[in-house]
Amino acid sequence: KQGTQYASSEDILSGQSIEQTVDLEKKLNQLEEEYNISFLYRSSLVQGKRSPVKVTGKETLQEKIKMLLEPHGLVSSYLDKRTFVISLSPIRELEVLIADTVSGIVMDGSTGETLPGVNILVKGTTKGTATDINGSYRLTNVGDQDTLVFSFLGFQTKEIAVDGRNRIDVQLMESILMLSDELVVVGYGTQKRSEITGSVASVSAEDIEKVPVLRVEQALQGRTAGVYVANQSGQPGEMPTVRIRGAGTTGNADPLYVVDGMPVGGIDYLNPGNIASMEVLKDAASAAIYGARAANGVVLITTKSGQPGETKVRYEGYAGIQNGWKEMNVLNASQYMMMMNEGAANAGLSLPFPVGQNVSGGTDWQSAIFNENAPMMNHQITISGGNDRTTYSSGLSLFSQEGIVGGDKSQFDRYTFNLKLDNDVSDVFRFGNSFNYSRIDRNAVLSNSEWGSPLSNALNMDPLTPIYELDEDDLQGYPSHSVQNDGLYYGISNYVAQEIVNPLARLQVTNGNTQVDKLVNNLYAEYEVLPNMVVRSNLGIDAAFVQNDNYVPVYYLNSAQSNDNSLVSKTENRWFTWNFENTISYEQDFNKHNINLLGGISAQQVHFEDLFGSKANLLMTDPQNAWINVGSDEESMTAAGGAYDEKLLSYFGRASYNFNDKYLLTGILRVDGSSKFGSNNRYAVFPSVSAGWVMSNESFMDDFEVINLLKLRASWGQNGNQNIGNFAYTSTIATGNGYSFGPDEQFTTGSIPSSVSNPNLKWETSEQLDIGVDLGLWNDQLMIKSDYYIKKTKGLLVQAPIPGHVGNNAPVVNGGSVQNEGIELSVDYRNYRNEFGYNVGANVAFNRNEVTHIGNAEGIITGAGFATYGIVTRADVGNPIGYFWGYETDGIFQNQQEIDNYVNESGNLIQPLAQPGDVRFRDLDGDGQIDDGDRTMIGNPTPDMTFGINMGANYKQFDLSVFMQGTFGNDIFNATRRHDLTTSNMPVRYLNRWTGEGTSNELPRFTWNDSNGNWTKISDLYVEDGSYLRIKNIQVGYNFSPRLLETLKLETVRIYVAADNLYTLTGYSGFDPEIGAASPLNIGIDRGIYPQARSYRVGLNINF
Amino acid sequence: CENFLAEEPLDQRVEENFYKTEQDAQEALVAIYDVLQWNTVIGYHVPEMLSDIASDDAYAGGASRNDAPNIIEVDQHNIRTTNGEVHGLWKKYYTGIYRANKYLQQIENIEAGDAFKSRTIAEAKFLRAYFYFDLVRFFENVPLITTPLDNPDEYSQPQAEPVAVYNQIGKDLMEAIPDLPESVATNQQGRITKWAGEALLGRVYLFYNGVYGQDLPAGDQTVDRTVALQMLEDVINNSGHGLMTDYSNLFTPESEFSVESVFEITYSDSRPWWDWGYIQGGEGYIAAQMQGPRVTQPTEENYQRGWSFSTVTQELINAFDPADPRLEATVLFEDELNGGLTIGYQHTGNFTQKYTTHKAYTPSEGQLELNWGNNYRAIRYADVLLMAAELHVKDGNPESARPYLDAVRNRVEMPTVEPTLDNIYQERRLELALEGQRYWDLLRRGQDVAESYINVPAGTKANYVGDDLDFKVQYDASTKGFLPIPQSEIDISNGNLIQNDGY
């Protein structure tokens, strides 16, 4: 609107001669220097414009500014702290000025757009109003000495003295960073940022918009100190690992997700573009309001709502291509033959290949399986709007991503639809509803597994086998059900066996599909029974239908991997959760005292049912036709199905006290009852208390003008974790233990308790102390936030191994303690002084994880293993959870002399089976032999430090953002080569092996008879540094000029190009240093990880 | 509110409301039988196959040196304490023992008829004895547990003296025998009979007496040679069991539960199974899959593609008189195959003919590898005859032994031999070859005998393919032929479990 008016005045100016004018921008800069002031403005307003000057030297600053701006229809207004905001002058209406009336328009200081719905309050009274749909307001009975307070969500609150004026136009500046008046969702309510006493981190819609992510969890990666996100793999749709302040448990360490007040099982149904804000409750005191499920932290997600005003239509979309960013260098054909010969020779065995045969190249299995330029795209349309009573926001989205390995065998599609509606029925009664439906269609291949995942196969398959076997003689030996593609048979290796097969053939016979339909709906009503006392009811449902289809065709991959009978199976899982919550809240000011009370009761039930069916011997072999009806073997039909119920009943309360915005105190108590525990321990109490001191509001801080916020915080609290299966406290009767009698093989049911029971099972409790400081400088231009915490988790829910002679499965017990201690620091700086604006933010978190107690006899919880080599990770006292447990090596025996010198006290050889070139292991326990007692911590998969760096800049209509994140001090267990299969291929770096005295002191000789256990013993040879710095995203955007858009009837248009995972700085030799895992005991083991894709995207956002 | 939270499982029973009715008891009893089939708790540890591999009759075999290193260790008598198969055996037997203990504990409170109770108690005791016997002859020093350990305070258990374990076995069998039925209905075949109990007692006696040189204690009784012989004679005279006419038909589907089967462990393809992660959940006999020849073209063969484990030694073949029809019935020679064969590890050119992937047994449904229905003939009547013959000879009555030995040889139309101990041992080797008896027969004859038969120098023989070293076997007398106590069991035993000698 203003744009039109303004365009014409520029036309008039264009006729003026240049000699009489100065460059407006330059002049403003000059004034900034001269008067030590700052102008805030949108570059398009002043750029390239010239203003007439008269220099008399007698003008005041105000007059000078006015003189410069007036010809362009611009005005300036004083913000504070020597800062002026320059904007378009508002439309002036003909007004009859009434003595005690104040009116005006409220605008967004940076865009010049009018702001509807801004609250205006006469300070110290309850008198006030709000701006109408055009952003204008009118207040009567305002005294000359009164001060008006303008506040609006997402903007800085502004106080302006009336000073006898009738017209006050106001420009509000967006609250750029974590400004103190911003409202933060804290669970069953909101709190002003300045009043928060716990440790709460936020991610805004803006942040997400800037770096469009594929999954919601990724929006947390690198953005918030203390929130560690690692993608489990690069496979589309794979759930990332999210750890808030370290893993506090050996079990499920995922945080609790609460979407619009509804606790949900997972968040992959959410479209990241639909999120208004995410809050992470990191400390126990903040999370205590979620009691029994909060021990791993809580993530609160608020979806976007409509705003009163005109209907807005928004399109956001991008399309891009993805590629693998790294291939591992493995042996080529001649290197392979040479090494295999050497391995055989060293074992005293006959050579498998003729000596000195030189075959060029060989098959590059990695390039064979990587899918070049795998497409991805996202489209989303949102319509929002409303009036002063009702607002709505509705959106549709479509996301589709193909994997960089396996093409459509590794594909993720998501469709979402949502509608959010809020209605003020009257001044005291409100209700609203938020509806989300999503559909996910996913195909996945096995990832990060040494048991036949395509990537593991590609790394271990010999380079001699061709992708397709064309040799007629060789084909003679191929069984009829060898896998073929377009009439060509996939090559079958003569050299490697077991799970190592042609990865393309493997992909061809992999047919797994998962479809999810999910509906989450949350309905609420609020009634203000008394002034400031609100009763609220929430009724949410979460219904999920998950369907898995699997089809195993007839195939022959090698002699160990074949299937003679096709099979189709289908699983239907169905969850239905309802969640009913009632709260009452009360807030009141008594002079300088403010109290805020909340009480509530909540009940939840989860009902689950599943159904499984399968049938063999399909009459049609196309995967398209893989339905149970197509199976022909009637007798093979199987069916299974079951159900469970799970319930939670909770009471909770919160009391907050605030004295004069200086002293803050909050206490929370939650009582949770859960059906997961027996009657001995059904209920548990979770208390917390926190306090804050806003030092910057003390009078003695008035001298420090640069400091606008200084707050000290301290909190303590307890949270629970109940992430175990149902009925773990009792022993269910397992029926699958039958036997067949008689010649007719009559199968007879047999039943036995499924495990030893533990009726005293109770909650895992996590107790956390947090001390923090928030600092805001130069009106929040620089924000610093730091926390120290110590978090102790007791009574870990574990199924610890019990002696085999007990004869049944171990019960779940409360069997351990873990401590996480750390420091978090985040620094954000932003500067929008002129047409070049930029911001820089960095966060870093240090965490030390230590197991302090394991309650079983041996004090150990064993974790993941590798191939046939046994356990690799475990948890025991004094070490971090899931550390790598193995032997320390001490170089390579260079000659027999060194072996003979390596003796124990009684003079016996410590490694009697060693030969020159073998690894020397350290005898740590000094018992004179190398055995399990010598195994120690050889690596820690969890980082000492995680960090993220955000940088943004805009110049004129261009903007640029760079986002980097990484870890430091974590190790990776490189299990990409199957050392147990001697003939599997290997990385080129193994060529640096020992081949004679002095050749290597790092890598042992290669032998097929590893009697010394060079590789069969899990040792630090496998461990590499996994630290990395990754440029996660770079983005360059362009905003079309308003003038152009005006003719197109569009509001804003932005196009951008983005690159993800553009560059990774790491010393790690595998595909990708980012290796997450669902279990804290399985993290950081690279079994041939599905790497993150490097993608390039072009995106377009349009507001109509 | 308490009611709101008090949830019961919807699709499962819990221990508190189980063990009430005769039907419950029946299910609990069947669950003990179930463990007889468990050969894959950790790795692939079919006891009869492993013991043959440990003996001089078979090598480990498999696809390659890397296929199953644990099984190769057993073959080479160089077993790591972390050997997975060894741990699997340990867990298998204790699972069976737990289930039997649980049954014997709970049956008292179950509402059921006396006849039902006494018979099923006897069955549970037989099975417990059967599991303990395998356990103690594999590991020698094992904890003796006779009630379920439901309280974590009871988990730490020391190893019992072997004699205490054998005493429990003897006691269980002596108590079971009177209450076991003399026959079972056809559709119940596979359930324990009195004859199985008596035959097992004879087997336990021979092993215990051979290794430890003493009579078998059995609670307040003692099983000496006379008692053992009485038991075996009872089977021979009164059971109705006898020899099948045609030895070459013994291991076919038609002769399952034949007149010759005193105790047979059933496997079947009647409950098709696909789960590679929990093979013992199915009913198939994995030994058949493991021991089958690795043929390249199953369509042209009488055999499905197996995994070529337990390759048969030339020594065993040489032990046979070439005219003995049992050779052909025992060994599958590679030249009997029509198409190609993938050469595996320790390839001797010979596979077992007894428990194999013969097409007559091809599963009608389910994952081929996991559903072989070959029943394992755990105790054959021929074995009973030879055990009785051995005891008669040891008793100084070779003439009483003669008819038994003759019966075994006459059946295969081989000339009779003198009833000497050596001849009986030789006959046991031939008659029972590749049925899981040989290793125990060697061990009970003393370490020298075991060593002399089991040791093989490096080198290949007639049809062997591989390196000389692959075929070398060095028996380790310091272990007395027993397996190591699994390291992880020692690790979590709170110092209660002590490693066996030689490890």
Image: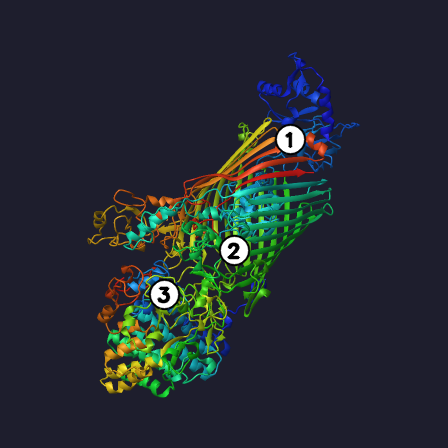
- Mark 3–mark 2 Cα distance, whole angstroms, equals 34 Å
Which of label 1 and label 3 is nearer to you? 3
Mark 2 touching mark 1, by CB under 8 A? Answer: no
Q: Is residue A701 left or right of A988 when viewed as pictured?
A: right
Applied colour scheme: rainbow
Q: Could you tell me residue B259's position as x and y percent?
A: 40, 83
Q: Which residue is mark 3?
A: B309
- In front of the other: B155 or A96: B155
Q: Distance from label 1 to label 3 (Cα)?
A: 78 Å
Image location (x, y in percent) of residue B446: 23, 72
According to the image, label 2 marks what residue? Answer: A487
Q: Are marks 2 and 1 on the same chain?
A: yes
Q: Secondary structure at mark 2?
A: loop
User: Which residue type carries mark 3?
Assistant: Phe
Return the mark for residue A110: 1
Same chain for labels 3 and 2? Say yes or no: no
Q: Chain of mark 3?
A: B
